[in-house]
Image (cartoon, helix red, strand yellow):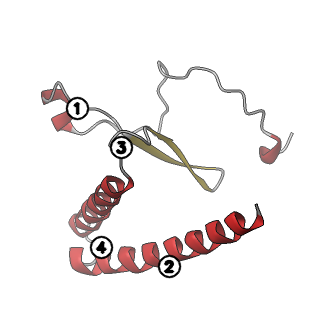
């Protein structure tokens, strides 16, 4: 069986940990109202998400969340010695804009086929 023939059985893994799993942010343990809205993994070379898509009820809030993720990634990269936050953020912004444009074009083509 190749990796692409994987049996996609969906059983509960909620009580298991993965050796590459990150720890939740420290602040989570001090906020009784904290809630996880997204977990992202790269598996078999592709992005795989577990998320609460309607956590906020509106798509624009996800735009703010994703912008916040980009900002934190850019700052963390600078802390690790990789360029500056502003440069990292600009590279992320450009790549994100390009990828979103491709996704919008693909979505438009798919919508026109139905």
Left or right side of 87 for 45? right
Location of residue 56 in the rendering, given as x and y in whole percent from the top left corner: 32, 43
Nearest to viewer (mark 4 / mark 1): 1
Q: Find disc 3 in the rendering and name its residue.
A: 57
Q: CB of mark 1 within 8 Å of CB of mark 2?
A: no
Q: CB of mark 4 within 8 Å of CB of mark 1?
A: no
Whole-angstrom CA distance, mark 1 to mark 2, is: 32 Å
Q: Find disc 1 in the rendering and name its residue.
A: 34
Position above or below: 7 against 13: below
Left or right side of 10 for 69? left
Left or right side of 46 for 68? left
Mark 1, secondary structure of its residue:
loop
Nearest to viewer (mark 2 / mark 3): 3
Q: Find disc 4 in the rendering and name its residue.
A: 82
Q: Residue drawn 48% across and 34% down?
A: 19
Picture quadrant of residue 110: bottom right
Whole-angstrom CA distance, mark 4 to mark 1, is: 31 Å
Location of residue 7 in the rendering, given as x and y in whole percent from the top left corner: 78, 33
Whole-angstrom CA distance, mark 4 to mark 2, is: 22 Å
Left or right side of 5 for 49? left
Nearest to viewer (mark 3 / mark 4): 3
Position above or below: 16 against 19: above
Mark 2, secondary structure of its residue:
helix
């Amino acid at each position: 069986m190749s990796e692409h023939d994987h049996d996609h059985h969906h059983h509960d893994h909620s009580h298991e940990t993965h050796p590459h799993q990150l720890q939740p942010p420290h602040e989570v343990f001090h906020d009784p109202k904290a809630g996880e809205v997204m977990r992202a993994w790269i598996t078999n070379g592709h992005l795989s998400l577990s998320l609460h898509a309607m956590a906020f009820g509106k798509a624009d809030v996800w735009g703010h969340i994703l912008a916040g993720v980009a900002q934190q990634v850019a700052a963390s990269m600078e802390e690790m010695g990789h360029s500056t936050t502003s440069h990292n953020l600009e590279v992320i912004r450009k790549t994100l804009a390009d990828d979103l444009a491709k996704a919008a074009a693909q979505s438009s083509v798919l919508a026109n086929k139905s």
